[in-house]
Image (tube, helix red, strand yellow):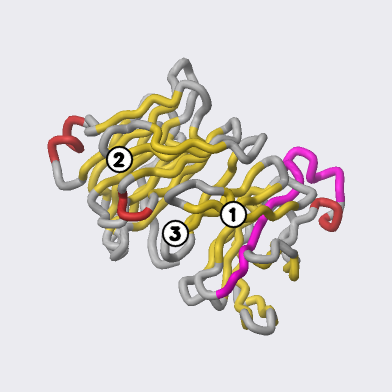
Amino acid sequence: MLGTYNGHTGALWCVDCDWDTKNVLTGSADNSCRLWDCETGKQLAMLNTSSAVRTCGFDFSGNIIMFSTDKQMGYQCFLNYFDLRDPQQIEDNQPYLTVPCAESKITSAVWGPLGEFVIAGHENGEINQFSAKSGEVLKKVKEHNKQINDIQTSVDLTMVITASKDCSSKLFDSTTLDHIKSFKTERPVNSAAISPIMDHVVMGGGQEAMEVTTTSTRIGKFEARFFHAAYEEEFGRVKGHFGPINCVAFHPDGKSYSSGGEDGYTRIHHFDPQYFDFELEA
């Protein structure tokens, strides 16, 4: 372990680094979003909220941050924007823009290209684009019929991939929100990622956690699953986890991926993308 960021007193729901890995942003169930120095672990700022922080992220420049709060304890879901170049906003705990989400809470969110809007997935399966200037909904689509658990962007930010409880993952154009491709499984999908070098996507999920103890690992479908992004066909599975996979991510060089599961393990697999030959690194 290289170091820790000590301060939160509740479950951590989200974490993000800015483009030069100078700062780290975290959101927690302790009703706070905190900014840290990446190298030293020093807390730079703490933004208090009325409910748990579910999603957070830096824009492309690293100057604007966004985070969303949960709908709980009588408070509705809000999407907040802060400009880190204005110390007064941080000191007063006052975002320059707050967007209420009364219909359905945000469960996952990422910045769109050029930091012009945030792409948010909701509990009811909707995807919205929220303007970072006005807060208005620029685009809205509903291709999923259950909660969206995860949204991740392609390396060039032109596409986003969703992971949903409706047992599917879908590829969208990040600017128009046009639905491009669908990838279907038999179990809820908790996370999905797009390869930075190949036309591949990896998906992780599995049976609901409370049902896991009654089934074997094979029935639970705990493999990481690889699909071809153009043909929508599954071409590989990687076993290893003994519980549902909660998150997946590709290495920037595209030659390895990591997955985190409810079995308490983070697994890193190195593979040759051309021949799909896997080797467990850690």
Depth-wise, is mark 3 or mark 2 nearer the camera? 3
Marks 1 and 2, how far apart at CA: 25 Å
Which disc, if any, is residue 132? Answer: 2
Are the two marked residues, 1 and 2, in contact with CB atoms closer than 8 angstroms? no
User: Which numbered disc flags the more N-terminal residue, 3 or 1?
Assistant: 3
As helix, strand or loop, the secondary structure at mark 3 comes to loop
Q: Is residue 207 magenta?
A: yes
Residue that appears at 73% across and 41% down:
208
As helix, strand or loop, the secondary structure at mark 2 comes to loop
The N terminus: image quadrant: bottom left
What amino acid type is highlighted by mark number 2? Answer: Ala
Residue highlighted by disc 1:
180
Marks 3 and 1, how far apart at CA: 12 Å
User: Which numbered disc flags the more N-terminal residue, 1 or 2?
Assistant: 2
Residue highlighted by disc 3:
158
**Residue situated in front as seen by the camera: 48 or 276:** 276
Q: Is residue 263 left or right of residue 199?
A: right
